[in-house]
Amino acid sequence: MRLLNRKPGAIRVRRNFVATRSKLLIVIALVLLATAAWFANSDPGSTTREYFVASRDLAKSTKIASTTVERMQADLATSGGRYLLADEGQLDKWFLTEPVASGELIPISSLASKRQEDCSPIILSLGSTLPNTLRAGSIVDLWAAQQSTTVDSIPYELALGAELISVREIDSGMGESLQKVEVCVSAAEVRSVVEAIAKQSTVVAVRSRT
């Protein structure tokens, strides 16, 4: 019966307060739902990057340039490192070693510098470890000497101005690591390098003087 004693104004204030609180709760709920939907649709681990693709059918030895490639965004996850990223610094720098069809991504494995296009890659073991200042892309001179315990072996120039393509560390199985390098030598020097490998000569690489 106490409710009958309340004033009409007090009842209206109470109802307004309840209505306002209900509207506020609805707004908060909608905001939370919108936020949850945004997080659900956004992938914080997204690996979407921009890559170069062939703008037409590209033949071997075609230069990677603004006229031969275009940009495309793609999420390639862990395989993204196999293809050429769309970076202006990559243009006019590479040539294709194999054809790429129109619309296809440019595989990094199919790229070579102009210097590599004009030479022949060869893999060989080095008799001494390369200094830290020499890495892929460095230009080196190769020297060789025949292994002999009975006569003095005179070192000789094996290849000049060879491009260092890659360096690989190999476990010899005796607690030592050996270096194998891939170098690009001129066609005229391929014979000498192959001959040195066949004779198991000791080969070292030094920074080129040319």
Image (spheres, helix red, strand yellow):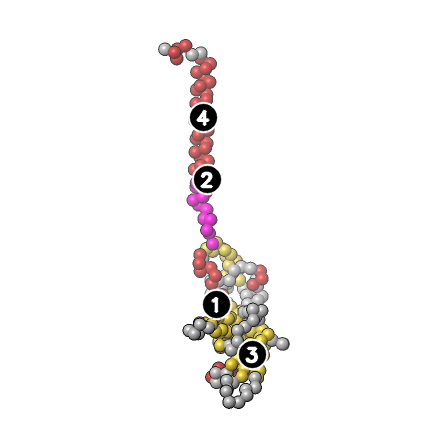
Amino acid carrying label 3: it is Leu
Q: Are marks 2 and 1 in contact (CB under 8 Å)?
A: no
First along the sequence among labels 2 and 3: 2
Q: Nearer the viewer, mark 2 or mark 3?
A: 3
Q: Are the two marked residues, 1 and 4, in contact with CB atoms closer than 8 angstroms? A: no
Picture residue at 46% right of the left edge, 35% below the top: 31
The CA distance from mark 3 to mark 4 is 83 Å
Please tell me whether mark 3 sits on a helix, a strand or a loop. strand
Instruction: Give coordinates of residue 196: x percent, y percent.
Output: 50, 83
Graded by Cα atoms within 10 Å as few (under 14), some (14 to 19) or many (20 or more), the crowding at tag 2 reads few
Would you name the residue on which mark 2 appears?
A: 35
Q: Which residue is mark 1?
A: 109
Label 4 vs label 2: CA separation? 21 Å
Estimate the x, y position of residue 147 in percent, counting from the top left.
50, 84
Q: Residue furthest bottom?
A: 151
How many numbered callouts?
4
Q: Is residue 98 magenta?
A: no
Q: Secondary structure at mark 1?
A: helix
Q: Residue at x 45, y 38 (%)?
A: 34
Where 91 falls versus 153 (above or below)? above
**Rendered view: 119 above or below 88:** below
Instruction: Using the numbered discs, state the Cα–Cα distance from disc 2 to disc 1 in whole angstroms.
Output: 43 Å
- Res 142 label: 3
How far apart, in angstroms, are the residues tagged by discs 1 and 4? Answer: 64 Å
Going from N to C along the chain, the mark reached first, 2 or 1, is 2
Is residue 119 visible to us here? no
Q: In the image, what residue type sits under mark 2?
A: Thr
Residue at x 53% of width, y 73% of height: 129
Q: Give 143 or 131, whichever is nearer the viewer.
A: 131
- Mark 2 to mark 3: distance in Å? 63 Å
Which residue carries the number 4 mark? 21
